[in-house]
Amino acid sequence: MFPRSSKVAIYARYSSDIQNPLSLKDQIDLLKKILHDNNNLLEPMIFSDAAISGAVIDRPGLSKMLEAVKSHQIDLVIAEGLDRISRSFKDMAYIFELFVYNKANLWTIHEGNIAEIHIAFKGTMNALFLKDLKDKVKRGQKAHAEAGLATSVPPYGYRIVRGKVDEKNRNIAGLREIDPEQSEIVKRIFTEYVNGRSLCDIYSDLNNDGIPAPRGGLWTRGCFIRRGSLGVGGVLLEEQYLGKLFYNRTTTTWNPLINKKETNPLPRSKWTIAEKPELRIIDDDLWYRVQKEIVFRKIKRDTTTKGPHFPLNKLPLTDWVKCGLCGGPKCVDEKHRYRCSRWRRDYRSAVRQCSNSIGTQDEIIFNAVFATIRENIHKSKDLRSQIFMTLIKNYNDFLNLNNKVFYLKEKIARLINLAENGVGGPIVIERIKCLQNRLEIINSKLRSICVKNIPTEEEIKKEFLNSVGKIRVSKDTQKLRGLFKLVLEKVVLTPTGNINKDEQIEVFLKEKWFSQVWSSLHDSNQLFT
C-alpha cells in the first residue's frame, strides 16, 4: 500500500557515465506519475546522482536527501528500487535505521514499503550482485589485456587509437600506438641520462625547448623517477617502453573504517603481461644501462656527505619562511640567505615557476621575528585571563597530590604502629617501604609544581620577555624551534622592487599563544625551558 504524506521526495540514480543519462529522467518521470496516480498532487523534492556507483555512500544527492530526512523536511522517499538507494549491505542498514529514527518511510516500485525483511534479503542480494559484477569486470579486463589491448591510460610516448571496428562493426577499445614526437623525447631522456647528464639539466633543457610535461606544464624531477606507496613510476622506470602491456599491477579495496577506497601495489607474480613488439620505444640494452645508472646514482647519493645546499639538520626558522610571490617555501643557501626553493630549482631553466631571486640573511629574519614577538607581548592586554586556566590546573594538581600525601602518611603511621606491636612481621615492613617510596615520588612531584598567586599584567609581561630573551641568546636550535612551534604562524618575504633588491619581512604569529608558552615555560619536561 502506498503511504500517504505531504512531504515527499524522489531519489534517482544511475551507475556509470557509459549508461544513458536519460535513465535519470525516465526514473523521475515514472515516480512522478506514480505519485499523481495515488492522488499526491504536491510537487516532490528531487534528489539524484548521475554516473555514481551505488557501492559508495558519499554521493551528493544522497547526502542532501539524508540531511532533509534528519531535518524533517521530508518523511517519505520513493525510488525505483532499493538498489538505487544503495548496493552496500552496511550502508543500506545505516540508511534504513536513519529513516526509522526520524519517523520517515522508504517506498520503491519493486519492493513496496521497505521494512527490515527487505533490508536483510534485498541488501544481501544487492551486495552479492555487486561482488559478482566486480568479478566479471576484472575477468573481462584480464582477457582484454591478454589479447594485447590496454586497460588504462597510455603513458607518455603513446596515444590512443580511435575509430577502428571489428567484424561486427563494434568499436575496439584499448588500442594504442607510438606517438612519433613524444617517443623521440623519451629516447632523448634515456640517452642523455645514461650519458651522465643530471635530471636537473635534462628537465631544464626540456622546459627551455618549450616541451610540455606528460601532464602538461613544466618538467620536474618527479616526471623521470617517482617512488611512492603504489610502487615506482616516471619516464625512466616505465617498462611499457619495452613493448609490453601490463594489467593488475595494483588493487583497489574499500576501507570501511574511513569509508574510502585504498589502492595498493600487487606483487609482480600477479601481474598480467602481454608482449606488444610494435609498441617498443627503448631497446633492452639502453633500458638496462639506464636502470643500472639509477641504482648507481642512488648508492652514490646515499653514501656521499651532503653539502650546505642540502642541510642535514633543520635551522631554527626552517618550515616557517615563505616566498611572498609564489607562496612556496624558502630555504637557506650556502651564504645563509633564505631564497625561494622554486626559483632555486628552476634557476637554470628559461621557464620558472617563481621569479623571486632575492635572498635575505637569516640573522635579519631572526631579529625581525623576535622584534615582532616582543612587540606583541608589550601590546597584548588581559594576559591574566589567558594564563588563568594554566594556573588553576597547577593548583588542582597541587591539591590532589597534597591529599595523596596526607593519605599515605596516615597509612604508614598505622602500619608502623602494627609493626611495633609485633603484628604482620616482614610483610608489614615490606609494605611500609613500598608506601614510603610512593610518598617520595609524590613529594618530588609536589616540589616541581610552583603554585603562586596570579601575577599582575606587568609581572606576566616581564616573565615572557625574560624567558623569550634567554631562549634567543641561547642560540639552541631545539629550544628555538620549540618556541616557534607555539608562537610562529609564518614569515613571508616579498621583494620590495627598489634599487637595493631587498625584501619586506612580514611576521605572522598564532592567536592566543600566551597560555601555551606560559604552560611550557613552567613545565620542566618542555624542550625550551
Image (cartoon, rainbow, N blue to C red):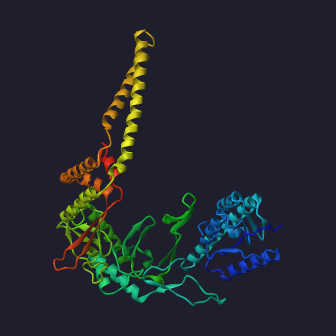
Quadrant of residue 510 in the image? bottom left
- Residue 510 vs 345, above or below: the answer is above
Asked whether, in this view, residue 175 is left or right of residue 374, the answer is: right
Q: Position of residue 87 (x, y in %)?
A: 67, 66
> Which residue is painted at 42% across and 89% down in the image?
180
Q: Is residue 38 left or right of residue 192?
A: right
Please report the residue visible at 75 percent of the width from the left and 58 percent of the height from the top: 116
Name the foreground residue: 459 vs 33.
459
Q: Quadrant of residue 40?
A: bottom right
Q: Quadrant of the N terminus?
A: bottom right
> Is residue 504 shown left or right of residue 160?
left
x then y, percent, for residue 258: 54, 59
Question: Residue 77: where, in percent of width, then height?
Answer: 72, 68
User: Residue 28 sits in which quadrant?
Assistant: bottom right
- Which residue sits at x=74%, y=80%? 29
Asked if residue 314 can be seen in this view, the reply is no
Query: Which residue is more in the foreground, 251 or 52?
Result: 52
Above or below, 504 against 21 in this view is above
Residue at point 53% right, 69% down?
248
Question: Residue 412 in the image: x percent, y percent?
Answer: 40, 20
Q: Report if residue 188 is visible in the image.
A: yes
Number of numbered discs on residues: 0
Front one among 485 and 511? 511
Q: Nearer the viewer, residue 70 or 149?
A: 70
